[in-house]
Every structure is written in C-alpha cells, then in structure tokens.
Amino acid sequence: MTHSTKKRTPSRAARHALGLALAIAGFSAYAQTEAAAPQPMAAASAPAEAAPAAPPQTRLRFNRGTYKPGIEHLRVVRRENTVQNVAGQVALNVAFAVLAGGVAAQGFSKDDLGGTTLEELKDDPLGVNPAISDLNDALSKVATDIYRKRAEAALATALTDGSTPEEIEAARQIPKEADTPLLPGPWHLVYENLLGSDELFRLKFGADLGRPGFMRPPIECRYQSEPVAWARWQADNWQLLREERAKAVEACTKIISAAPEKRW
C-alpha cells in the first residue's frame, strides 16, 4: 500500500524569522565589503609656489690697497710695537743721515704699526675687518640701487637706438661687482699712552670708497672709540667690541652712502 507524504509548509512566523536572518546577513556582508573597499584618496595638495628669485646684488670689491696682508683681521698695537719700531727707526735715521748729509728720515705714527693678530678672535667673525663683511653688506645695498637705475637708463636707450637683441640684453644686466672698490682703513686696538702702565686701548676703524687720486680723492671714513681698559674690552665675550664695531659700521655707512652717485 502506498503512503502519500504531505509536504510541510513553514509557518508564517518561521518565514518571517528566516527573512530577517537573511537580511541581517546581507547587511553584514555589504558592510564588510564597504570597509574593505579602498577609500578615495584626498586630492593631492597643490605644490607650494617657488619663492621668487632674489634680485641681483652689486657687491663692492674689497681691495687691500697699500696695506699688507693682515689688515683683514683685527690686530692689537701695544707699547712694545712702538719701542721695537723706534729702535729700528733710530738705526735707519743714523744711516740715512750719513747718506743724505745730515737730513733725518721721516717719523711714524703708532696708527701705522701693524701690531699683532688677536689670537682669541682669529677665527671669529667679530675679528673680521668690517670693510670685508658688515660695511660691505650695507654699502652693497646702496650700490645695487645705483647700478639698477643705471641699467634701467641703459635699457631705455638701447630699446630706442637700434641696438641688437644681444646689446639690449646686456644693457639690462646689473653687474655683480661695482666698478669702484672699497679699500680698508685701520681695524685695530691701539694703545693710548706710550708712557705709564695703564692698559687703555682705542678701537680704530676706517674705509675708503674709490682709488686714491689727485683729481678725485676717495670718500673717507674714520672712526675711533674712547680709550677703554683692556679688561673691559675682553669682558662678557668682547661685548664692548661688538657694540663699538656696530657703531663704526653705522657711522661709515652713513658717510660713504652720502657720496654722489657718480663716485660709485
């Protein structure tokens, strides 16, 4: 005898639970897929604009002039330097008097003595002659303005006088080095009194714009401090020397900057 089997249909509650389970499973799979998917990259930041090139500068040429090597660094002139020089000068005067029939040779100034390099500041920028560094930097700004105006005038002329493209390009160029040199003057600490036992020294500095000449002498600047005890010069890592150096540079910048533009 054949038995018929009746297929059981899930109840409504069962079907509802199954649908809910499938929905939850589907949502979970979607969430995992979203998490695994690569996120869009943030827009690359735009490259920073390049800083504008610095305008060309015209430097002054440092020329040692008649000074011997050593003027580039601070030197100290002490009493013994004069004593040594006097001994040599006396011998020279005697020899010269014999040769010249009794006419004595010319004397000298302690400011003309070379002295000795200050070893403590030999490798310190503080000891460098300001005509090479600080003063040159300050005056180069003045020279740059003067030579820029000259270039503008030359360019304006070249654009209207039939100059070639090469000549026009040359006219617009601002030279890197000025025609007129900057010559150093003294840069030393000089003893104040030859006699006695005091340790007073003055800081002396100088610079000239232009070559020496009979028709057009250079623009001169000379600066000297008050006489100060040697211990004070050395105190606080040469703080007084730093202050006086700044004053010397400021004074010479003001004097030389006032020179007529045709002297540059």
Image (spheres, rainbow, N blue to C red):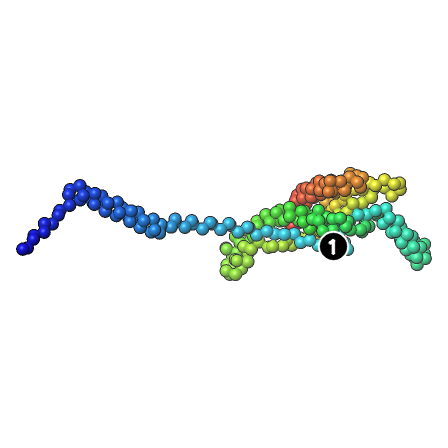
Residue 185, how many percent across, how many down?
74, 49
Whether residue 260 appears in this view of the structure is no
- Residue 21 is drawn in which quadrant? top left
Q: Amino acid at mark 1?
A: Gly
Q: Quadrant of the N terminus?
A: bottom left
- Residue 248 is drawn in which quadrant? top right
Residue 93, how many percent across, how many down?
91, 54
Q: Secondary structure at mark 1?
A: loop
State the residue at coordinates (85%, 41%). 193
State the residue at coordinates (26%, 45%). 24
Residue sitting nearer the eye, 189 or 178: 189
In this rendering, would 228 be left or right of 162?
right
Whether residue 155 appears in this view of the structure is yes
State the residue at coordinates (65%, 54%). 179
State the residue at coordinates (87%, 43%). 194
- Which residue is most to the front? 1
Residue sitting nearer the eye, 153 or 129: 129
Q: Which residue is mark 1?
A: 65
